[in-house]
Amino acid sequence: MSSEAWKRISRRNFLYGTGGAALSLPWLEGIAAQAATVSTPAQRMAFFYVPIGVIRRGFFPNEANAELRKFVDTKEPINGAKMPVGFHELELTPTLKPLENIQHKVSLLTGLDRTFQHGTDVHAQCASCFMSSAAPYTIKSSAWPLDRTLDHIVADQVGHATPFRSIELSCNSHKDNKESLHFDNISWYGTGHVAPSMRDPRKVYRRLFGTQELKSYRNITDLVLADAKSLSRELGSTDRHKFAEYFDSIRTLEEQMDKFEKMKGELEEVDLEEPTAALLPRGEYIRLMADLMVTALQTGLTHVATMMIAPERWDTPYMFESLFDKPRSHHQMSHKPQTFVDDLLKVDHFHMQQYAYMLEKMDNIKEANDTTLLDNTLFTYGSGLGDGSTHQYSDLPIIVAGSGGGKLKTGHHYHFADGTPLSNLWLTQAQLMGVNRKRFSDSTQALGELLA
């Protein structure tokens, strides 16, 4: 590559096309070779939040025969199957089976608890306080133990290097909300100040990649095509292939959004008993939002991202395509586990498939030093409940994928002692992302045993 070409591009630069569109570049080997030194890949943090807990016998090792407890609003600690504290072989239970292709880069963490603050609804604290930095009963201006969440605390540290300090996504397209915003958001700037999530894929795309003037909006790859062709002629064969692959992925996003919007338009013209959003295929919707999030992390538009798969407790139904022939309410089924256990297991497996889709996609994106986007990310799957029917805040289902740039051990199952707070994990992750603090929420210590 010529020195003149090197001056025009770098890992952090944007391509600008006519109309003001901006598109960030993927990591290219030839560009890195021109630099005086190959920079260390940026470290990212992401969250994949699933509401209403899981069916324990499908998710947790050693609980295949766990009792299906009847609905009870307990909120008190309920311990799962007893296991020795420490590392164990990672057993892919039925719910975890979709992780098979990537299991060497994920870790299952069991035994982590949260403290419920009495006086408010269990589901409200479940999601809104999942990443909260407030210890219970320390916030006097709110009934919830809710303060600035982990994603924004980390974004305070790393967000200055990216166009977007953080992005917040939700896969809840319903508008018929019966609950307060505490049931439908996991990201908060502070007590009473929600970080509003983006729910419309087209709006997400335009915010991340589109022009400032929507009237002049055109296909983003057309806007930068001239610059792209000029640049690609000066790249080596490997980088030309990666460059073409990258632009193809953007084009695919556009095609997926066109298909999704056409489907929405057709549904809106039909007289339906269910709200239009109930008929939209969940998998397609989640994967489209997932592709947008992964691309934003890949291109350096942000280093911190959250995705809430669905809200807590809303009874509005969803169309889990390939599972059921009509929309179903996850929350309503969770209160009757004896009746709907097989269906609930299918939903848990379905959600894990979407998470696995994202992990495999990220692991196929190469970055510097023979690492992948997944290697350089701390990507946490979790729910605020350990069981949807008991409402327990103990022994939560937590998975961490990626090693944060080689800083975490992966490919194992670690079981913690009873009473270990989830905030110990958040403290560990915050420190790995460069945040200088000794405590997070009600943490007792960082989880040094997880460090590589």
Image (tube, helix red, strand yellow):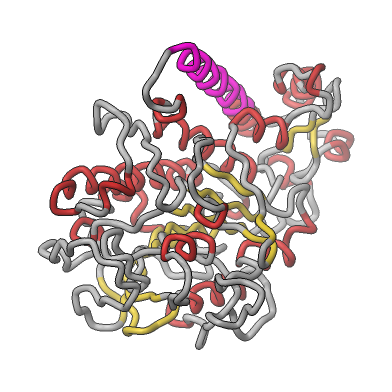
Q: Height in image: 69 above or below 347? A: below
* Residue in view at x 40 percent, y 33 percent: 282
Q: Is residue 154 visible?
A: no
Looking at the image, residue 368 sits to the left or right of residue 211; the answer is left
Asked which quadrant contains residue 26, the reply is: top right
Residue in view at x 19 percent, y 74 percent:
81
Residue 134: x and y in percent read 59, 76
x and y percent of residue 268 in the render?
Answer: 50, 17
User: Is 15 within the magenta?
Assistant: no
- In depth, the one of 82 and 90 nearer the eye is 82
Q: Relative to 433, does residue 355 appear above or below in the rendering?
A: above
For the point 39% across and 76% down, the residue is 113
On the image, the x and y values in percent for residue 257 come to: 56, 23
The N terminus is located in which quarter?
A: top right
Q: Is residue 103 above or below residue 190?
A: above
* Quadrant in which residue 211 is drawn: top right
Residue at screen point 25% across, 54% down:
335
Q: Magenta residues: mostly which secondary structure?
A: helix
Residue placed most toward the observer, 90 or 200: 200
Magenta segment: 247-270
Would residue 180 be visible to someone looking at this image?
Answer: yes
Q: Residue furthest left?
A: 65
Q: How many marks?
A: 0
Viewed as shown, does residue 148 lie left or right of 19? left
Residue situated in front as seen by the camera: 414 or 246? 414
In-front residue for pair 416/106: 416
Q: Give x and y (percent) for residue 312.
A: 43, 53
